[in-house]
Amino acid sequence: MIFMKNAPTLLFLHGALGTSQDFLPLMEILKDKGATLLSFDFSGHGKKTSWPEEFRIDFFAKELDDYIKKNALDDLIIFGHSMGAYVALYHQAHFSPSPISRIFTYGTKFNWSEQSVSKELPMLNPENLLQKYPSFAATLADKHGERWKSLLLSTAHMMQNLQKLDGLTSEDVADIGIPVLLMLGDQDRMVSTEETTLTKQWIKHADFRMISHSKHEIERANLKEIAQVILENLMLN
């Protein structure tokens, strides 16, 4: 956490399979730029959080709501990577009143059809990862400890049921009245430009920004450009 007196508050929400530590390089760029920087881990992620009752977007949105209330946050700006931004948008659509005043998204998937989800499932199979992508499996084990396999399987289950249980509809996001900036890496293979720009059309005050030389993972994104976009929109130095 980096606190600055009388500064706007920027909360970073990590993606599925991620942790708050993923944002440290981006937060390093943004420190001393005139904002208070905060982050936390969703349940089941990292090595120290408790295991959630269920992997659901609405459960993680409740955790976000609890974090906001516990820390008495107001006029809150959120930068969410992938699932983190989906949770923030869900919170804004379903929790009232909300102190969130602006949302930045990066690499957030909105198409959760069965066909779209099926493409991602092999990467959420622990044995497949160990066989074909051992370095990625090792990274997950380093981030999450012994429960990394359970995290993969629970995330897969969440994704398979997301559209049916917690999927954001066009009506949901149409009720979001705050500014939302949808960012997407130009080399993102998980999230399409089409699904992102379609969602932009549904949100009253939304804009879209393509980030150059960037993949889906926040660790492989152009952080300098993302930071500049954030600073420009918040009119910070």
Image (tube, rainbow, N blue to C red):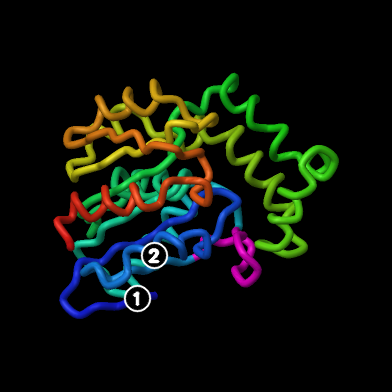
| Residue at 56 percent of width and 62 percent of height | 43
Q: In the rendered view, does 52 fall on the left or right side of 102? A: right
Find out whether residue 47 is within the magenta segment: yes
> Which numbered disc, 2 or 1, marks the residue that appears first in the sequence?
1
Residue holding disc 2: 27
Point out residue 33 in the picture as x, y percentages from the top left corner: 24, 67
| Residue at 59 percent of width and 69 percent of height | 49
Find out whether residue 190 is within the magenta segment: no
**Residue 121: quadrant of the picture:** top right
Residue 96, which numbered label? none
| Residue at 63 percent of width and 45 percent of height | 155
Residue nearer the viewer, 214 or 196: 214
Where disc 1 sits, the SS reads loop
Q: Are marks 2 and 1 in contact (CB under 8 Å)?
A: yes
Q: Residues within 10 Å of mark 1 (few under 14, many from 20)?
A: some
Select label 2 or label 1 by which is in front: 2
Residue nearer the viewer, 168 or 143: 143
Point out residue 210 in the picture as x, y percentages from the top left corner: 34, 33
Where disc 2 sits, the SS reads helix
Q: Main secondary structure of the magenta part?
A: loop
Q: Amino acid at mark 2?
A: Met
Region in magenta: 41-52
Q: In the rendered view, does 164 fall on the left or right side of 127? A: left
Residue nearer the viewer, 97 or 73: 73
Can the viewer see residue 66? Answer: no
